Structure formats: structure tokens, C-alpha cells
Amino acid sequence: MEPLTRTEAIIDFCLAPLSLDAGTEAEREVRRRMTHVLRTYQAKVANPIAVDFSSMPSQVINEAAHGYE
């Protein structure tokens, strides 16, 4: 997987597992908020930011400790 640099590509990747209905008010609001966060962060750093999700460590959830939901 190539590192993602475009704000929209990062948001699309993050929202994909949620299967939100495209065009709903909730989906638009999530995109608006995530865009604001990413652009604010990118504006504060000197170098362009690329996100490489392929090097992200996996997380294990202990369902017994958190409930089987």
C-alpha cells in the first residue's frame, strides 16, 4: 500500500470499515470534522504528511474484558 497524502484519500480509508451511507447528514458531518482535523494538523507541520497504514501495528481487543458486543 502506498502512503496516503491527500486528505480525502485518508478519510476514505478510515471510513471504509464503517460502511456509512454516502450522502447522509452523518457521513457529511464526519467528513467535515475529519477534514478540519487533518488540514489543521497539516498546516501546523513544516513538511507534507503522508500516512502509511501498511506499517500501522495491529491491535488486539480483549472481548472478555470489554464485553462481547
Image (spheres, rainbow, N blue to C red):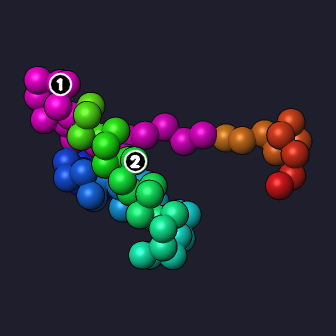
- At label 2, the amino acid type is Arg
* Residue under the image location 54 percent in, 42 percent down: 58
Find numbered disc 2 in the image and state the secondary structure of the residue it sits on: helix
Question: On the image, which quarter does residue 62 sit in?
Answer: top right
Farthest residue toward the front?
Answer: 25
Which secondary structure, mark 1?
loop
Can you tell which mark lies on residue 20? none
* Range covered by the magenta-colored residues: 42-59
In x, y percent, where is residue 14?
43, 54
Q: Quadrant of the N terminus?
A: bottom left
Say above or below: 1 vs 65. Answer: below
Residue density around tag 1, few if under 14, some if 14–19, many if 20 or more, within 10 Å:
few
Name the residue that disc number 2 marks. Answer: 33
Q: Is residue 20 left or right of residue 32?
A: right
Q: Percent x, y for residue 34?
A: 38, 47
Residue sitting nearer the eye, 4 or 25:
25
Q: Is residue 23 above or below residue 40?
A: below
Is residue 44 rendered magenta in the image?
yes
Q: Going by the image, does 26 lie left or right of 23?
A: right
Write down the quadrant of residue 39 in the picture: top left
Look at discs 2 and 1 and give the one toward the viewer: 2
Could you say which is closer to the camera, residue 14 or residue 32? 32
Q: What residue type is labelled 1?
A: Val
Magenta stretch secondary structure, dominant: loop
Circle 1 residue? 45
